[in-house]
Image (cartoon, grey):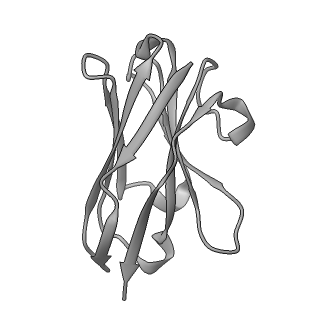
Amino acid sequence: QVQLVESGGGLVQAGGSLRLSCAASGRTFSFYAMGWFRQAPGKEREFVTAISKSGDNTYYRDSVKGRFTISRDNAKNTVYLQMNSLTPEDTAVYYCAAGRRYIPMTSQYQYDYWGQGTQVTVSS
């Protein structure tokens, strides 16, 4: 089992930045590729970004490329999502997830463990 706990969400104005963190506990963190997904009200959960087990490779959805950066610290069992130039369209609950497969892993069904989510709200 892997337990994931997200933090860092909040309310920010358009153009602002937030940094999300996801702390993992349980099995060896470096065994898992990590991803971030988001779900806006009335919409399906969508892939945002993923990072490989070592952190050497990353993958992003087109709409966040150049604005969001995923990273991980395997010594701290934590994955991060730095979000810059936020827009109201980024408003959603953000979830981190862990999976044993290889990225890009854009489908939620490729992940084995999920956090509870953290709310990100971007005001215009």
Answer with left or right where residue 101 lies relative to residue 65: right
Task: Return the x and y of residue 8 as percentages of the image width and height.
Answer: 30, 54
- The answer to whether residue 107 is visible is no
Q: Say above or below: 120 vs 62.
A: below
Out of 46 and 41, give the one closest to the viewer. Answer: 41
Q: On the image, which quarter does residue 67 sit in?
A: bottom left
- The answer to whether residue 124 is visible is yes
Task: Return the x and y of residue 68 as percentages of the image width and height.
Answer: 37, 53
Screen quadrant of the N terminus: top right
Task: Return the x and y of residue 46 as percentages of the image width and height.
Answer: 64, 55
Answer with left or right where residue 84 lies relative to residue 4: left
Q: Say above or below: 65 vs 30.
A: below
Out of 68 and 24, give the one closest to the viewer. Answer: 24
Task: Return the x and y of residue 101 as percentages of the image width and height.
Answer: 64, 19
Q: Residue at position x 49%, y 55% from top? A: 94
Q: Say above or below: 9 vs 100.
A: below
Screen quadrant of the C terminus: bottom left
Q: Residue at position x 46%, y 34% from top? A: 4
Q: Residue at position x 66%, y 57% from top? A: 45
Q: On the image, which quarter does residue 109 sit in?
A: top right
Q: Could you tell me how many numbered marks the image carries?
A: 0
Q: Residue at position x 47%, y 69% from top? A: 90
